[in-house]
Image: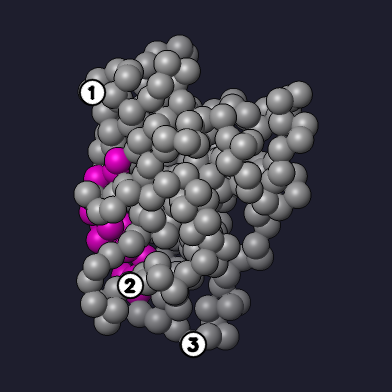
Amino acid sequence: MEGDKYRGHLAGEAEINTEWRHGAPPSYELVNELFEQERTKDWPKGSLEEIVQNTIKTWEMEVSHKTRLEDFKSINPDKFTFSVNGRKPFSAKETLEIGSYNVLLGSSLPDDMLAYKSSDETFESSHDVFRSAFPRGFAWEVMAVYSGPPVITFKFRHWGHMEGSFKGHAPTGQVVEMFGVAIVKVDDKLRAEDIEIFYDPGELLAGLIKDPKVAATETTASAPASTHTGLSCPVLRH
């Protein structure tokens, strides 16, 4: 398999013994097409912005599709932590177990106020929820980089077309997007040791629950088959 132009560590001799969640490396063809058609920034090759963008896309790919931390090359597994909006940090092992969506959408709000309850979701179910809502993928881009290594601070945009159902809510066909800021501490090999993300989950979820819920049969009919073709977040399926 050939590599991906936006993500490293997908192919080559170093990945011969990698254990992939779905048995083989993912394809990002659909979400790459969406990214190229609708990105707002086209960073020069080799620029700090492009390096940061591709590094985060690589991390998202690894946490979504590799099952063993020993196969990760974008982070330092022994030191890595991941936190969102100042909440408790998760270790690399914890993030891999519950999935990045469940870290990103964790909340202390009462259950009856939650559009998405991460404590009820598994790694697989969380990815299926968003794979259903965004059949073409959930694209991700760097909007600006404010500081370089070893502490990288940047603004990002995450977007997709809601062409499938979300938790029983009918597809709108509209673009759902969110913006955020991240602080990433890296080592001398540019491996992430700490990722902090700050964003408003309501910005994302409001677009997904805009239309009322529909009958289960209608929801099932609108949901695409699960193909496991790289349609997962990274912040973060990018």
In the rendered image, which residue does mark 2 sit on?
A: 115
Residue 113 placement: quadrant: bottom left
In the rendered image, which residue does mark 1 sit on?
A: 146
Element assignment for label 3? loop
Q: Indicate the quadrant containing the N terminus: top left, top right, bottom left or bottom right.
A: top right
Q: In terms of depth relative to the viewer, which is nearer, 223 or 102?
A: 102
In the rendered image, which residue does mark 3 sit on?
A: 215
Q: Residue at position x 50%, y 63% from top?
A: 126
- Residue 233 visible to an observer of this rendering: no
The span picked out in magenta is 196-211
Q: Position of residue 141 (x, y in %)?
A: 39, 35
Q: Residue at position x 38%, y 25% from top?
A: 186
Q: Amino acid at mark 3?
A: Ala
Q: CA distance from mark 1 to mark 3?
A: 46 Å
Q: Nearer the observer, disc 1 or disc 3? A: 1
Q: Residue at position x 30%, y 41% from top?
A: 196
Question: Is 197 part of what is drawn in magenta?
Answer: yes
Residue 170 placement: quadrant: bottom left
Q: In terms of depth relative to the viewer, which is nearer, 215 or 2?
A: 2
Element assignment for label 2? loop
> Which is more N-terminal, label 2 or label 1?
2
Residue 118 placement: quadrant: bottom left
Element assignment for label 1? strand
Q: Is residue 150 above or below residue 66?
A: above
Q: Position of residue 202 (x, y in %)?
A: 25, 61
Q: CA distance from mark 1 to mark 2?
A: 32 Å
Q: Nearer the observer, disc 2 or disc 3? A: 2
> Which is more N-terminal, label 3 or label 2?
2
